[in-house]
Amino acid sequence: MKDFDEARAERQARDRSFRIGGKEFTYRPAVAPEAILRWSQMTGGEMPELTEEQAIEIFDETVLAFLEVGQDGNWRAVRDPNAENPLNISDLRELVSWLFEEQTGRPTGQPSDSSPGSGSGGTGTPSTEGSPLQAVKG
């Protein structure tokens, strides 16, 4: 018999902590697909009229969906644009990609689907040049 709960228990038991912006966080062992739906829509090209501000909101919303309850305040602190060393778009992309990989146990492929050597964007679905949205589409 295939026991799907075995894999779920393994995810629950492993170390799920990480550090970014000087703070330690713990991600959830599972995230419902509905909690990351806007991320999927954004990266799937279903939101072509997305503004820069909305894309950044979706980054934050996605990270918060992955985090264990009660870490919102720490996330807001590391995301403060006035912080001495604020997180940049590259930090956010790398973190979200890593969280998806940890959650699924396999690479997402999204950042590497960009053009070769692309560190600040990609050649995916067109949007505003250099935008966070362009950086996640591939």
Image (cartoon, rainbow, N blue to C red):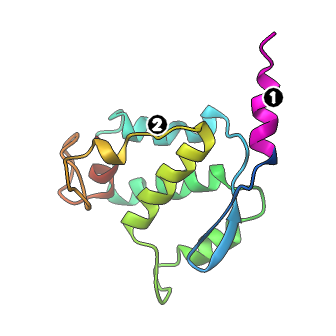
Q: Residue 98: x and y, percent?
A: 52, 52
**Horizontally, is 26 left or right of 57 in the view?**
right
> Which residue occupies the extreme top position in the image?
1
How many numbered marks, from 0 up?
Answer: 2
Kindly identify the amino acid type of the residue bearing the numbered disc 1.
Answer: Glu
Q: Main secondary structure of the magenta part?
A: helix
Q: Is residue 35 magenta?
A: no
Q: Residues within 10 Å of mark 2 (few under 14, many from 20)?
A: some
Residue shown at the point (71%, 40%) measured from the top left: 30
Q: Secondary structure at mark 2?
A: helix
Location of residue 131 (image quadrant): bottom left
Cα separation between marks 1 and 2:
27 Å
Camera sees residue 137: no
Q: Circle 1 sits on which residue?
A: 6
Query: Residue at 52% of width from left, 78% of height from top?
Result: 80
Query: How would you rate the neighbour count of disc 1 (Cα within 10 Å): few for under 14, some for 14-19, many for 20 or more?
Result: few
Q: Secondary structure at mark 1?
A: helix
Report the residue marked by disc 2: 40
Task: Give the residue type that dot 2 points to.
Answer: Ser
| Extreme-front residue of the structure | 1
Residue 36 got which mark? none
Q: Position of residue 76 (x, y in %)?
A: 60, 72
Q: Quadrant of the N terminus?
A: top right
Q: In this picture, which residue range is highlighted in magenta?
A: 1-12
Picture coordinates of residue 116, whole percent (x, y) = 19, 49
Compared with residue 2, is residue 52 higher up or lower down, i.e. above or below?
below
Q: Quadrant of the C terminus?
A: top left
Mark 1 / mark 2, whichever is N-terminal: 1
Instruction: Tell me which residue sits at (22%, 60%) in the image.
Output: 130
Front position among marks 1 and 2 = 1
- The answer to whether any part of residue 46 appears in the image is yes
Q: Nearer the viewer, residue 126 or 26?
A: 26
